[in-house]
Amino acid sequence: MKLETLTQVNAERAARRPVVVVTDVANGDQRLVKAKDIATDPLSAELSKQLRMGKSGMVESGGKKLFLNVYAPTARLVIVGAVHISQALAPLVRSLDYDVTVVDPRTAFASPERFPDVPLIAEWPDVALPPLNIDHYTAFVALTHDPKIDDPALLHAFERDCFYIGALGSRKTHAKRAERLKAQGASDADIARIHAPIGLSIGAVSPSEIAVAIMAEITAELRLPKETAKVQAA
Amino acid sequence: MLNRDEDILQAAENWQKAGHGVALATVVETWGSAPRPAGSSLVINDDGTFLGSVSGGCVEGAVVTEALDVIASGKPKMLEFGVADETAWNVGLSCGGTIRVFVEKVGQS
């Protein structure tokens, strides 16, 4: 690998932008494909598939065996609400290799005793969220049930192109939330991005089961092609 | 976590810039129950220092030896490890899988 290629891979990774290194394993010839160039690349279909799966692998093209090494940013989950579901969700999401952060201004909730070893920010969303640099490889869930906390958090998530946004609450609660968010400038398209009621419909009852339903929905959003993900969620 | 790919590649860059000969070994294909997926990598410098892994520790020793050759020659190499032949017991995979590892020099033109 050329030093220049390696330096570029490291720079893209540091900026949390996905990148793929294509290697002809017969002779070591190599090129780097940045995320923004995938759509116009001759290997576009293969590249986008491998990237979506976050998986490296060998492909054949034009009689050549090419290794596609995918460097996708570590997925993150930002949990707003240090609630009972979050206590089950944080360790679950870590076992799936996500980075996780819990935000809740209520210090009685956001306590290290309740969340051992989990990065906690006991601040309001307007203070806590901007420094997190939330991006496309971030899933975002609002679980407090308190509009004073959830609403500004969701408004922030809309601006940041999160691959998943979910909010706890019944259909009725969600309808009221949609009205409030629109009054604060959210568009219909923004509202449509919220998964609510949150989680795949698996009959979850306990906080841990709800955590599983949420992670199943986030996984589907991350891994399935866009059309399929919508069918599943419908 | 030290064995995340970004740390391994950062080490590769740092070592190279510090004047070391460096090789990168990457799992490119796996069959059966391989310990680490395609894309897993190991970076080796000319001291024999290495970071990361391409298996659960079964074949790293052999990969490091081959990597030192690659650093010297500058020519990439494809290695295959499995339990297919008897000599493979020395550096084979106890899990019964087979892996192919591509070893390349960092900084080759």
Image (tube, rainbow, N blue to C red):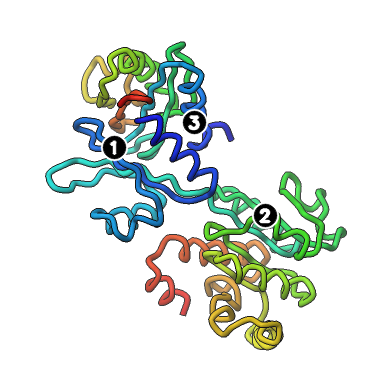
Disc 1 is placed on an element classified as strand
How far across and how far down the image is residue A192, in percent?
54, 80
Please tell me the numbered disc located at residue A30.
1
Q: Which quadrant: the N terminus of chain A? A: top left
Query: Horizontally, is B108 left or right of A214 in the view?
Result: left
Residue located at (71% from left, 60% from top): A129
Residue located at (29% from left, 19% from top): B74
Kindly identify which residue carries mark 2.
A132
Counting residues from the start of the chain, the first of labels 1 and 2 encountered is: 1
Same-subunit check for callouts 1 and 3: no
How far across and how far down the image is residue A66, in percent?
24, 42
Residue located at (57% from left, 50% from top): A98
Q: How many numbered discs?
A: 3
Kindly identify which residue carries mark 3.
B8
Same-subunit check for callouts 2 and 3: no
Residue kind at label 3, given as amino acid type? Ile
Label 1 CA crowd tier, 10 Å (few <14, some 14–19, many 20+): some
Query: Horizontally, is A46 left or right of B19 in the view?
Result: left
